[in-house]
């Protein structure tokens, strides 16, 4: 059977984020023709009776020719919403167990979404990279060369320091004055309660907020050969644990953590998408768009 | 149960190694990076559950291998009660039949005592042996008392010289092969002279119970003809009278006068009284031994009137024959060599050789086989015809003496002898202007008789490559000066200097005459003729290359001891009986040899009681009393378990290999 999805390890072999994004999105868009469920903006929604003062450009003249009544044609999703990606560039994002780190995966995902937004929908796109502070900010724009700027920002986003949503979240509001789509890409190694509490205000501004929870397979299902000393990538703290714990208790705890985050996010009206880095990227993209489709 | 080498148990400390590999090593925690420790909790290996040993069976096997190996090195043994072997006990009856047992009724007494011991053994397993110069088993280990008794009764007096060291060696060999307790009964006169030179040679194994039965308890006086000095050969009709000297010895004897007689072919030709001092020796001379042509059986007898008449005579053989012809081939104009060699040969005690001197040009028409041996002196060039005929002569059994002299220095190699000439050494140019003898092989008779050529000055010699030749004499600078080589069936002796008083002063040295005489005897083979030998000595019958030529040996009893096959192939014969051996050797020569018992057998002194007790102590024996048949002995014998432990080590090692490879295979799959 032909390989339908693109493995992250294959994407890692492609040099240049633009080419990665183009590979992912083009293949993905080609698949849309067979998937009428997908797509957003410029979709017909309803007719509305013309009232004086309405823009004549929106009158459906075909209907007028048949019925001699003037109706305005209304579209769904003609949002032209700016897309802003908040990329977590903390140390924990550089963890990998199979060649593609969470940071790489986040880069591929972000690049693909930028490509989709700027080339597919002519939407404005911007990025904020952060760890415990705001590291980089590129205002959402549709200007020429915006894609290259964004991709350069992705390239420069080095994993360092530790994640702290609370600190940079204060500044998010300042940057996100215009309503749009806000995607937060992170491994979310914090308590779900504080994450949701920190990010919920973004939603209240009218933004559509989606959490991309990027995790390595080892984050979810760690395997230890024997008693091991574990080193935290962000804090360098050490802790000795046993294979038994990793195999049983930890798995239960991480499952609970994910479920808790998902539930709290949904409860707060935030979108949630779990991405394991061995999962094909276009598959992840598909899930995201399905998520948005369901929302609209 | 015990350990022969318990100090190897110190290696038990090494057992910690498998534990380290299986337990401690597994406990090592390896640092591993994770995204976050948020959900992790600290856990350590629980004492019982996590510290369990990996691969417990493998660990057990490894411990077993190490433990067994250490135990094997410690060499465990179990003490097995010898009583359990009583039914397997071998009663070894050894009767001494050496020459000294002919004294009085010693042998008969010994046999009688042996029969008495056998009668008391009941159904015990027994083996009978006679012990002369060697241990001779007369039966297998059997329970047939009649056969054992018959074997004892069949023991005849021998002429050999007993040696208890040889007896102990044979018993040790027997003990190693039968591996059962042995009750050794030795019936002997316990002669002191039969003790081994080294007392440890007489040690008996632990499983041998030694019960000596002495048939003589104290030394007996005995006179004997200890030795006779007489030539083996007399040459010519008008040879000078032969002088015979006999030594009469007395052991534990008072001073006494004895009558010594010289007997030739059964006729007493001379009788002389000899005063033998107390416990001493006296020589008696017979100045004129007249013997007819051919081989003559001679003996010196004394009338000792002691209990051991068998040693009162000494056999020797004398052959009278015509002098042998010897050819000297020298350079034309060389008159010195014939002079010195001829003078030396005629000055010898017996005029055994007639020297014929010719120069090389005259040698063509001579037949080499007519001569006992041939001397080549200082030959510039040896005609090819002469070289060929001399080579053939040597190969067929002839002997050659080559004196290289000065002329040979121009050649590349010594003719016939074949040694390459490396260089010439002119010692007149060294500071001392001469070179003396550095080392000599005294086993060569000509050198031994000449006492190593002391004071002989060499001014010139050839340095030759000895190759496979035997170097008999070397000069101080290690130049070989006298060499011997066997070519075919013959011998060639090479003297790398000359016989002309120019290259050395040897012809003027007193050592020259005995050297020439003995060399002549050696090369002509006459030194092996006639004379006397000692019982158990070996007599050479043929050279190695004379295979196929039959020899004929007639022993003192007139029997032929060699089978036809032995007669065709035997290199030598052991002279086992006293008397006269008549031989026809492979080279066609006849010979008659007088054989006498070892003079040590005439000393009837017995082993002191303390030495005897020491010997018994060495063999772990507590008493001289013969034990009752089938009686239980409290003595225990340690039996080593080393072999069984090593078998277990092997089995455990194989199991460990199989198991370890299985586990390793699993690990590979896991990785």
Image (cartoon, rainbow, N blue to C red):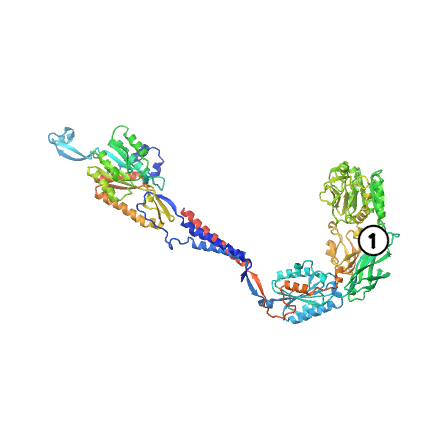
Q: Is residue A181 left or right of residue A12?
A: left
Q: Would you call the spot at circle 1 few (<14 residues within 10 Å), some (14-19), or many (20 or more)? A: many
Q: For the image shown, how many numbered marks are present on the structure?
A: 1
In the displayed structure, A287 sits above or below B273; it is above
Nearer-the-camera pick, B496 or B192: B192
To which chain does the residue with label 1 belong?
B
Q: Secondary structure at mark 1?
A: strand
- Please name the residue shown 71% across and 70% down the image: B112
Q: Is residue B573 left or right of residue A4?
A: right
Q: Position of residue A264 (x, y in %)?
A: 23, 44
Task: Farthest residue to the right: give it.
Answer: B238
Q: Is residue B537 left or right of residue A221?
A: right
Q: Position of residue A252 (x, y in %)?
A: 30, 49
Q: Quadrant of the C terminus of chain A?
A: top left
Residue A16 visible here: yes
Residue B294 visible here: no
Task: Farthest residue to the top: give it.
Answer: A144
Residue under pointer 1:
B233
Q: Quadrant of residue A82?
A: top left
Q: Quadrant of residue A205?
A: top left
Q: Position of residue A280 (x, y in %)?
A: 31, 40
In the displayed structure, A245 sits above or below B280; it is above
Q: Quadrant of the N terminus of chain A?
A: top left
- Please name the residue shown 26% across and 44% down the image: A191
Q: Position of residue A154 (x, y in %)?
A: 31, 34
Q: Is residue B160 left or right of residue B289?
A: left
Nearer-the-camera pick, B51 or B655: B51
Q: Quadrant of residue A173?
A: top left
């Amino acid at each position: 059977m032909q390989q339908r999805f693109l493995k992250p390890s294959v994407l890692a072999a492609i040099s240049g984020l633009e080419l990665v994004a183009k590979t992912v999105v083009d293949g993905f868009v080609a698949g849309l023709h067979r998937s009428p469920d997908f797509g957003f903006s410029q979709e017909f929604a309803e007719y509305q009776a013309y009232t004086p003062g309405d823009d004549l450009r929106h009158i459906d003249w075909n209907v007028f020719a048949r019925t001699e009544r003037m109706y305005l044609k209304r579209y769904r999703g003609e949002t032209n919403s700016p897309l802003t990606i908040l990329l977590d560039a903390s140390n924990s994002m550089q963890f990998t167990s199979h060649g593609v780190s969470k940071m790489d995966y986040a880069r591929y995902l972000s690049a693909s979404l930028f490509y989709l937004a700027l080339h597919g929908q002519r939407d404005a796109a911007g990025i904020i990279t952060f760890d415990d502070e705001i590291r980089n900010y590129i205002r959402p724009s549709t200007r020429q060369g915006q894609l290259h700027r964004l991709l350069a920002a992705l390239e420069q986003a080095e994993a360092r320091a530790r994640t702290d949503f609370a600190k940079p979240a204060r500044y998010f509001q300042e940057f996100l004055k215009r309503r749009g789509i806000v995607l937060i890409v992170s491994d979310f190694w914090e308590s779900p309660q504080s994450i949701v509490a920190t990010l919920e205000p973004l939603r209240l501004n009218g933004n559509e907020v989606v959490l991309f929870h990027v995790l390595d397979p080892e984050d979810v299902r760690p395997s230890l050969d024997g008693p091991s000393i574990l080193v935290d990538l962000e804090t360098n703290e050490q802790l000795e644990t046993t294979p038994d714990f990793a195999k049983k208790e930890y798995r239960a705890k991480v499952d609970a953590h994910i479920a808790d985050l998902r539930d709290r996010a949904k409860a707060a009206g935030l979108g949630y998408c779990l991405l394991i880095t061995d999962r094909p990227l276009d598959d992840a993209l598909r899930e995201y768009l399905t998520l948005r489709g369901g929302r609209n | 149960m015990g350990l022969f080498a318990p100090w190897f148990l110190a290696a038990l400390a090494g057992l910690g190694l498998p534990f380290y590999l299986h337990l401690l090593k597994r406990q090592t925690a390896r640092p591993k990076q994770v995204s976050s420790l948020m959900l992790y909790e600290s856990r350590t290996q629980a004492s019982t559950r996590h510290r369990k040993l990996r691969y417990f069976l493998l660990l057990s096997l490894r411990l077993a291998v190490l433990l067994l190996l250490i135990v094997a090195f410690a060499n465990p043994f179990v003490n097995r009660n010898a009583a359990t072997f009583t039914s397997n006990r071998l009663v070894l009856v050894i009767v001494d039949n050496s020459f000294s047992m002919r004294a009085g009724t010693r042998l008969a007494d010994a046999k009688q005592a042996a029969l008495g011991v056998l009668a008391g053994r009941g159904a015990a397993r027994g083996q009978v042996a006679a012990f002369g110069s060697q241990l001779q088993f007369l039966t297998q280990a059997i329970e047939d008392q009649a056969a054992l008794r018959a074997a004892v009764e069949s023991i005849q007096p021998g002429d050999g010289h007993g040696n208890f060291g040889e007896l102990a060696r044979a018993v040790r060999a027997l003990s190693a092969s039968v591996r059962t307790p042995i009750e050794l009964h030795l019936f002997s006169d316990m002669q002191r002279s039969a003790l081994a030179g080294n007392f440890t040679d007489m040690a008996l194994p632990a499983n041998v119970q030694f019960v000596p039965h002495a048939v003589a308890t104290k030394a007996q006086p005995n006179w004997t003809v200890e030795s006779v000095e007489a030539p083996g050969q007399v040459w010519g009709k008008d040879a000078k009278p032969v002088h015979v000297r006999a030594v009469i010895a007395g052991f534990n004897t008072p001073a006494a006068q004895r009558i010594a007689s010289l007997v030739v072919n059964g006729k007493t030709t001379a009788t002389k009284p000899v005063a033998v001092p107390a416990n001493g020796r006296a020589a008696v001379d017979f100045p004129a031994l007249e013997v007819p042509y051919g081989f003559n059986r001679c003996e010196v007898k004394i009338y000792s009137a002691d209990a051991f008449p068998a040693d009162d005579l000494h056999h020797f053989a004398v052959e009278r024959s015509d002098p042998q012809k010897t050819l000297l081939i020298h350079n034309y104009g060389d008159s010195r060599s014939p002079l010195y060699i001829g003078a030396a040969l005629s000055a010898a005690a017996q005029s055994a050789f007639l020297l014929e001197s010719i120069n090389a040009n005259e040698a063509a028409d001579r037949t080499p086989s007519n001569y006992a041996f041939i001397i080549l002196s200082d030959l510039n060039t040896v005609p090819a015809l002469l070289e060929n005929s001399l080579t053939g002569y040597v190969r067929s059994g002839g002997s050659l003496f080559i004196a290289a002299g000065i002329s040979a220095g121009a050649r590349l190699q010594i003719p016939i002898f074949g040694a390459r000439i490396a260089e010439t050494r002119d010692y007149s140019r060294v500071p001392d202007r001469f070179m003396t003898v550095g080392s000599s092989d005294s086993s060569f008779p000509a050198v031994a008789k000449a006492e190593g050529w002391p004071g002989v000055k060499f001014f010139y010699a050839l340095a030759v490559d000895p190759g496979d030749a035997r170097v008999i004499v070397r000069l101080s600078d290690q130049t070989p000066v006298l060499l011997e080589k066997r070519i075919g069936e013959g011998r060639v002796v090479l003297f790398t200097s000359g016989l002309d008083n120019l290259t050395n002063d040897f012809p003027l040295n007193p050592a020259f005459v005995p050297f020439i005489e003995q060399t002549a005897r050696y090369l002509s083979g006459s030194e092996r003729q006639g004379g006397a030998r000692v019982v158990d000595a070996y007599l050479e019958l043929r050279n190695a290359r004379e295979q196929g030529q039959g020899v004929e040996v007639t022993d003192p009893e007139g029997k032929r001891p060699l089978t036809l096959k032995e007669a065709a192939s035997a290199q030598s014969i052991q002279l086992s009986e006293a008397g006269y051996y008549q031989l026809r050797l492979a080279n066609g020569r006849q010979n008659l040899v007088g054989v006498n018992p070892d003079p040590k057998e005439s000393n009837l002194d017995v082993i002191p009681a303390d030495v005897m007790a020491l010997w018994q102590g060495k063999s772990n024996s507590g008493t001289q009393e013969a034990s009752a048949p089938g009686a239980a002995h409290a003595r225990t014998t340690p039996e080593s378990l080393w072999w069984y432990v090593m078998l277990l080590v092997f089995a455990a090692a194989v199991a460990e290999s199989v198991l370890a490879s299985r586990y390793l295979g699993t690990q590979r799959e896991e990785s």
